[in-house]
Image (tube, grey):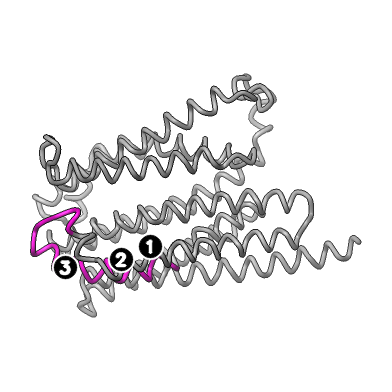
Amino acid sequence: MLALIFCLFGPFWLALSGQSDDLAAGGGNVMRVLGWGLPAHLVFLATAFFLDGIRRPKPAMVLMIVANVLNAGFNWAFIQGEAGFPAGGAEGAAWATTIARWFMAIGGIVYVWTMQDHEKFGVRTKPTGGWKTWARLRVLGYGTGIAIGVETISFGILSVFAGWLGPDALGAYSITLNLLSIVFMIAIGVGSASAVRVGIAYGRHDFRDLALAGWSGLGVNTLAMMAAGIVFILYPDWLGGLYTTDENVLAVVVPPIRLCGIVMLADGGQAVMANVLRGRQDVWVPSGMQTVSFFIIMIPVAWFLAFSAGHGVLGLFEAIFTGAVVSLTLLSIRFVYLTRSDDTSGSDRR
């Protein structure tokens, strides 16, 4: 709710950050629309993580796939005013995202509430035991929340940088980031499924299967990102044209879209490894690694490349690639360390 309230005052915050009046007004409206989708996003995450925990990831996966199809359809209708809808541009794209998020949230709630074995998992049972009962869950949740919050704030700062580069640059940045976010949902799904497998293996002290589950998840995601990346590299003009017909914006957006064909390999990979480590119940160290990668490293690199080096919008995505590579490297090293430590301790017990 605090994030929603913050977004409702989007024009004020954007003007405070030094954006022009037009950008503050337009971007603020987009923030408001996206803000209405934030509660739905959190509700869906809660239901998806619950389903992952009971080894039932498919319903959330299906909801995400359908939501992405709906998002694409609404983007087509809302952005340029197809099928009788008014042309909404960036605000239209924001409405498409918000509607898709509410679809996932409502779908997740309906499935969990009506599943046949809801009594087994206490879905409709009033919680007992008080605040202390949830101590372990809160510790895991705080660490995950901090990591997600830092990453979100970091990308928000990059949006401010894009606004300082001008309207065309902001439009190009928003389009490219939206495309990258759609593909990123695949990594989230693979990461969630991998976390379930890792968590199960960790619970039964099968550390070799734990390692296999983690690296298999990264491998599957890499193949998926490579397939999507080929489309980004070969057809950036077509992808950009789905969002705008403005020749000035299209001229700026093509290079970063093409670059994101490579960026998604690292960005999706680090998301999978972060989930894998959470499945291993390792939260705080990975959160610190992601904070360093995206807040301490990515933001200064983005400033340097976009402004000092004169790379503009392309520099922002070069910085995202840099932060993602650092994050993926650190998280992978952490996973190697833990799996070796687990395997050694398991051998000692035997």
Decide if residue 226 is on the left or right side of residue 81.
Answer: right
Position of the C terminus by quadrant:
bottom right
User: In the structure shown, which secondary structural element does the residue marked by tag 3 occupy?
Assistant: helix
Question: On residue 228, which mark appears?
Answer: 1
Marked residue nearer the N-terminal end (1 or 3):
1
Residue at 34% from the left image edge and 73% from the top image edge:
301
Question: On residue 237, which mark appears?
Answer: none
Q: Amino acid at mark 2?
A: Phe
Position of the N terminus by quadrant:
top left
Q: 210 or 307, which lies in front? A: 210
Q: Quadrant of residue 88?
A: top left
In x, y percent, where is residue 316? Answer: 28, 68
Q: Quadrant of residue 315?
A: bottom left
Q: How many residues crowd mark 2 within 10 Å: few (<14), some (14–19), many (20+)?
A: many
In x, y percent, where is residue 189? Answer: 50, 50
Q: How many residues crowd mark 3 within 10 Å: few (<14), some (14–19), many (20+)?
A: many
Residue labelled with disc 3: 252
Q: Give the number of marks.
A: 3
State how far apart marks 2 and 1 are (Cα).
7 Å
State how far apart marks 1 and 3 are (Cα).
21 Å
Decide if residue 338 is on the left or right side of residue 234.
Answer: right
Q: Quadrant of residue 305?
A: bottom left
Residue at 40% from the left image edge and 73% from the top image edge:
322
In x, y percent, where is residue 254? Answer: 21, 68
Magenta includes 273? no
Question: On residue 232, which mark appears?
Answer: 2
State if disc 1 and disc 2 touch (CB < 8 Å): yes
Marked residue nearer the N-terminal end (3 or 2):
2
